[in-house]
Image: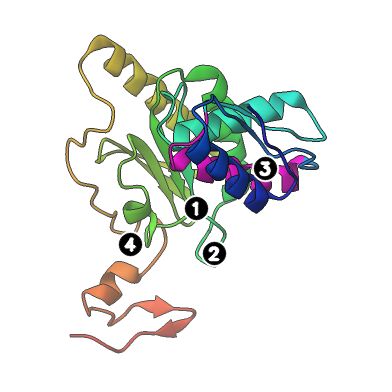
Amino acid sequence: MPSRSIDPTVCIDAYTAISERFDYPLHLGVTHAGPRETGCIRSVIGIGTLLANGIGDTIRISYAGDPADEVRDGLEMLYCLGLRERHGAELIACPTCGRIQVDLFRLVQEVREKLATEIELPIKVAVMGCVVNGPGEAEGADVAVFAGDRRGIIYVQGQRVANVPEAEILDRLLDECRAFQDKVKAGTARLGEKVVQIVPPDPIGELGSGESLIARGRTTDLTINGSEGTAGG
């Protein structure tokens, strides 16, 4: 039984009322949702809220656009709600901020495209633009890269395995993803399991930052923005 509207709040109220009165299978959808940019948001609010509340039996994402996007976004919604087992990698990535020192957004898109064709297991892959928030935000990732001053440090299950220049991040990260997938298939590694907890890299000499010395209070002789540091012991 469908009950559709362009307004996701109307859909939520209508489907909720129907589910309380009748024991019929419910087909969820936000109709006339528009192009993907707006339709995705309307669908996530309407359909996602209902599914999270245990309402709905089938779904249909509707865009004025490529039907393949409807399928991809519908599957991602089900993955995120734990209603369908994920097929393929899950990508975690930073938003924009002033600490990013690599072309993160290009890197994320390239990683996403490669993972879609080369990784079939639900490996969590994190692409982080700095070592400040990266380790915490990447917690739970099987394979992760933390970028800094045109470099990237790559971790697998919490263990650091490589420190590479920006131009080599993509290839090395994918190599580690493929190798980890092979280990999982062979039974020598398990998804979501940490060998050790991620220890943030010491940026000095690796990612071009003085943050570790500042944190330890040893900033004497440290040049920051062209000025000699004087604090610390």
Q: Are marks 3 and 2 in contact (CB under 8 Å)?
A: no
Which label was assigned to residue 94?
1
Give me the C-alpha separation between circle 1 and circle 4: 22 Å
Residue 177: give x, y in percent of width and height.
40, 26
Q: Residue at x 40, y 56 (%)?
A: 207
Residue 17: x %, y % from top left: 55, 44
Residue 167, compared with residue 181, is above or below; it is below
Q: Which one is in front in this view, the residue at disc 2 or the one at disc 4?
A: 2
Q: Reply yes or no: does residue 54 show up in magenta.
A: yes
Q: Local crowd at mark 3 within 10 Å, few (<14), some, or many (≥20)?
A: many
In the picture provided, is 128 more to the left or to the right than 4? left
Q: Which residues are magenta?
A: 36-56
In this figure, which residue is indicated by the disc labeled 3?
40
Q: Which sits in the foreground, 43 or 123?
A: 43
* Towards the viewer: 120 or 197: 120
Q: Which residue is mark 2?
A: 97
Pick the front one: 88 or 156: 88
Of circles 3 and 1, which is in front? Answer: 3
Crowdedness near tag 2: few (<14), some (14–19) or many (≥20) residues, C-alpha within 10 Å = few
Asked which quadrant contains residue 202, the reply is: bottom left
Q: Position of residue 23 (x, y in %)?
A: 49, 28
Which amino acid type is marked by label 2?
A: Cys
Quadrant holding the C terminus = bottom left
**Residue 206 in sight in this render:** no
Question: What residue appears at the point 33 percent right and 23 percent down from the top-left corner?
Answer: 180
Comparing labels 1 and 4, the label whose residue is closer to the camera = 1
CB contact under 8 Å: marks 1 and 4:
no
Q: Residue furthest bottom?
A: 230
Q: Is residue 84 shown above or below 210?
A: above
In this rendering, the answer to whether 44 lies above or below 219 is: above
